[in-house]
Image (cartoon, rainbow, N blue to C red):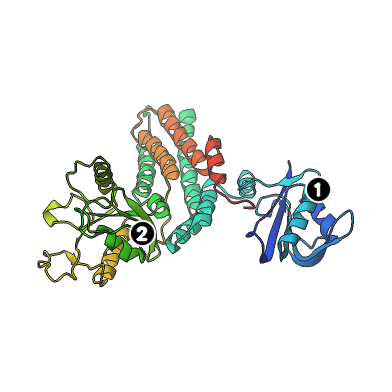
């Protein structure tokens, strides 16, 4: 296997740059550059030199890790160099000159950690989410996954499932009873299936990662674009007195109390003979239907049916405005009246759609395989034949193997590790 290397810290210039080397020739390469390596899992200052010319490269902190007790499960050396471009380039050039050493591909260090059993696929997904996290809520959810929270839970499920499978196989081989299936075995399969179903009912990570879609909608000239600009704090949408100015939707990602949202301004809803405006109105209707939270700026009776709608009475600063309908929130994009209260209401709605900070949440792939395991266990609960019951349990075990990355997921691995940066 090739030994790989990469700059694992940010692009220079920086105060310190970390260069990682992993693979069977990592220690040899480290010794030729640093002279001697420190004891395993110990840091020491070394003068780095070109192995052929002896020319000094830098004075750096060097760390050594021995297989399998390293982040990748392989021999690893880290050089913590000064972060100037010339220093980093010089060290990387020397590493390139070694035979059987090559630059790492994006995510290759983490992929080797997975392939060497240091992490499972759920932890790798958590690391990918952690690298992409932009809000505090995303960070906490990703950290729980990367820290092995789901892996530990799945390991418990697998142990229980293995016990059920062993009991079924024992009964097939040794039981002489006329009864085909022990009812207690069926109940145990059902209890585990129900537990998995309860996990599937939890809020998922898609809204957390992609943002909760908050759609601002209403008739033309209701003040939708002005409200979006007031919330964002800059002119993101064009505002004029001409009805139908907004022809297409405008999306603005925001962090609201540490929660990611995707605030969307839409075209005003009305009958229009203008072909372009009609397309925008049709898109607005689709966005309203897909919205997680709807902020409605029109008449109460005209509001589309929606489970989470916040009714807003806009332009409250105008002297000729009629009294606001009961329950509607008075908002002025000019004076700022009601904007903070609107954001508070949006946040209250949004938090109910997201996983709680102390809960492990599932992504679409994880939920798919847990659902497959639950289906297998549910069929095992209903099986009247021991051989069929054992087969359904085998299907459930295979689903857990796909969940943790131990079977049939090569295409998933390629897609996942391509999300990682170089050097991770």
Tell me the element at label 1.
helix
For the residue pair 233 and 155, the one nearer the viewer reads as 233
Label 2 to label 1: alpha-carbon separation: 51 Å
One can see residue 187 in this view: yes
Q: Which residue position is annotated with label 2?
A: 236
| For discs 2 and 1, the disc positioned in front in the rendered view | 2
For the residue pair 321 and 328, the one nearer the viewer reads as 321
Occupied quadrant, residue 175: top left
Neighbours of disc 1 within 10 Å: few (<14), some (14-19), many (20+):
few
Neighbours of disc 2 within 10 Å: few (<14), some (14-19), many (20+):
some
x and y percent of residue 133 in the render?
Answer: 48, 58
x and y percent of residue 253 in the render?
Answer: 39, 57
Instruction: Determine the residue positioned at 69% across, 51% down.
Output: 68
Q: Is residue 399 above or below residue 149?
A: above
Q: Which residue position is annotated with label 1?
A: 97
**Left-right relation of 266 to 25:** left
Looking at marks 2 and 1 on the same chain, the residue that comes earlier in the sequence is marked by 1
Mark carried by residue 362: none
**Left-right relation of 204 to 418:** left
One can see residue 355 in this view: no
């Amino acid at each position: 296997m090739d030994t790989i290397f990469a700059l694992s810290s940010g692009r220079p210039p920086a105060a310190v740059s970390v260069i990682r080397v992993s693979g069977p020739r990592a220690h040899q390469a480290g010794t030729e550059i640093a002279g001697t390596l420190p004891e395993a899992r110990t840091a020491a200052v070394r003068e780095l030199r070109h192995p052929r010319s002896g020319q000094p490269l830098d004075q750096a902190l060097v760390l050594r890790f021995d297989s399998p007790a390293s982040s990748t499960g392989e021999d690893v050396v880290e050089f913590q160099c000064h972060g100037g471009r010339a220093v980093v380039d010089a060290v990387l050039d020397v590493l390139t000159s070694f035979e059987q050493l090559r630059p790492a591909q994006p995510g290759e260090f983490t992929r080797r950690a997975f392939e060497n059993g240091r992490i499972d696929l759920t932890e790798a997904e958590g690391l990918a989410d952690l690298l992409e996290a932009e809000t505090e809520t995303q960070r906490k959810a990703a950290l729980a996954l990367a820290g092995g929270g789901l892996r530990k839970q799945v390991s418990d499920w697998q142990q229980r499932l293995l016990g059920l499978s062993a009991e079924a196989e024992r009964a097939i081989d040794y039981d002489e009873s006329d009864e085909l299936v022990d009812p207690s075995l069926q109940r145990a399969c059902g209890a585990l299936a129900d537990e998995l179903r309860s996990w599937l009912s939890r809020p998922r990570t898609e809204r957390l990662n992609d943002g909760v879609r908050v759609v601002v909608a209403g008739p033309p000239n209701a003040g939708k674009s002005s409200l979006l600009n007031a919330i964002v704090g800059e002119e993101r949408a064009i505002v004029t007195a001409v009805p139908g100015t907004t022809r297409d939707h405008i999306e603005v990602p925001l962090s609201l109390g540490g929660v990611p949202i995707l605030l969307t301004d839409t075209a005003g809803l009305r009958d229009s003979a203008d072909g372009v405006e009609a397309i925008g109105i049709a898109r607005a209707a689709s966005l309203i239907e897909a919205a997680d939270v709807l902020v409605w700026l029109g008449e109460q009776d005209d509001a589309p049916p929606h489970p989470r709608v916040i009714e807003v009475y806009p332009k409250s600063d105008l002297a000729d405005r009629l009294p606001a309908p009961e329950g509607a929130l008075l908002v002025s994009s000019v004076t700022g009246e009601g904007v903070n209260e609107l954001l508070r209401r949006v946040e209250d709605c949004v938090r109910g759609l997201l996983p709680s900070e102390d809960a492990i949440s599932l992504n679409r792939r994880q939920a798919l395989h847990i659902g497959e395991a639950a289906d297998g266990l549910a069929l095992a609960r209903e099986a009247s034949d021991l051989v069929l019951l054992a087969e359904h349990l085998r299907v459930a075990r295979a689903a857990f193997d796909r969940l943790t990355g131990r079977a049939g997921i090569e295409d998933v691995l390629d897609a996942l590790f391509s999300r990682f940066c170089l050097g991770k």
